Image (tube, grey):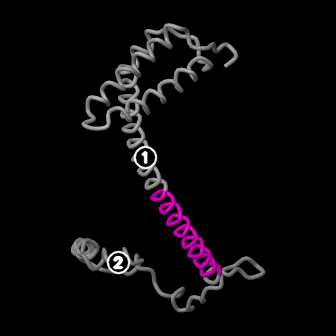
Amino acid sequence: TESWQTLSESSRKFLESVMDSGILSVLCQQSGKKGDVQKHLNLLKERMLRLFKTLKVPPGKLGELKNILSLQLAEKQMLEANEETLIQLQEEITEAERSAEHIEETINRLQNKIQTLKRQLEEDEKKAQKVFQEGGTGALHLPELPKRSLQAPSLQDEILKITNQKGLLKDMNTIQQSADMKNMLTLI
């Protein structure tokens, strides 16, 4: 503001002519008591002109005052564009908030699932420890085999005693390929 100067004489004359035309347009629209309205408007004009003599403004050209309407129109268009941009930004912010809420819900769901899986893992580990409890010797506590199973003849010895070994082989192959045998192997 230090570089600002008072209005030039030409600028004051231009503003005075603008005010005169404004006064004339107002008086044309008045139907009665034009004298009082004209007096009041002339008093306002004189006050404005006195103010213009001391008013400091940024240095500029008179041409800028003449382009006020185009500048105002440009400012209005820029304001409308800014409002549209603001609406778009608001929509993007709303969408980002929804996305953040969705991500937060997903994180919470996953954290709950992780906690559930941790608890389940701990329970499974406890069950496994019970099943595979190791004694002081490191041996598993399994039931002992009956002695007669160790004394029973092996299957190979029994097969060698059979005279129709090819038929037996065919029967064993049929048994091995059966659905019941496959289910039993799956179970085992």
Reading the image, the residue beneath label 1 is: 90
Considering only order in the chain, which callout, 2 or 1, is on the residue closer to the N terminus? 1
- Residue 82 picture location, percent across and down: 41, 34
Q: Is residue 109 above or below residue 46?
A: below
Residue assigned mark 2: 159
Identify which amino acid the numbered label 1 is placed on. Gln
Residue 182 shows which numbered tag?
A: none
Identify the element where label 2 is drawn: helix
What's the residue at 58%, 71% (across, down)? Answer: 115
Check contact, mark 1 vs mark 2: CB within 8 A.
Answer: no
Distance from Cα at disc 1 to Cα at disc 2:
86 Å
Residue pictured at 43% horizontal, 46% vertical = 90
| Quarter residue 72 falls in | top left
Horizontal arrangement in the rendering, residue 68 relative to residue 129 (left or right) = left
Magenta region: which residues? 101-129
Classed neighbour count for the residue bearing mark 2: other residues with Cα under 10 Å, few (<14), some (14–19), many (≥20):
few
Between 83 and 19, the one nearer to me in the picture = 19
* Disc 2 residue type (three-letter): Ile
Q: Residue 102 magenta-drawn? A: yes
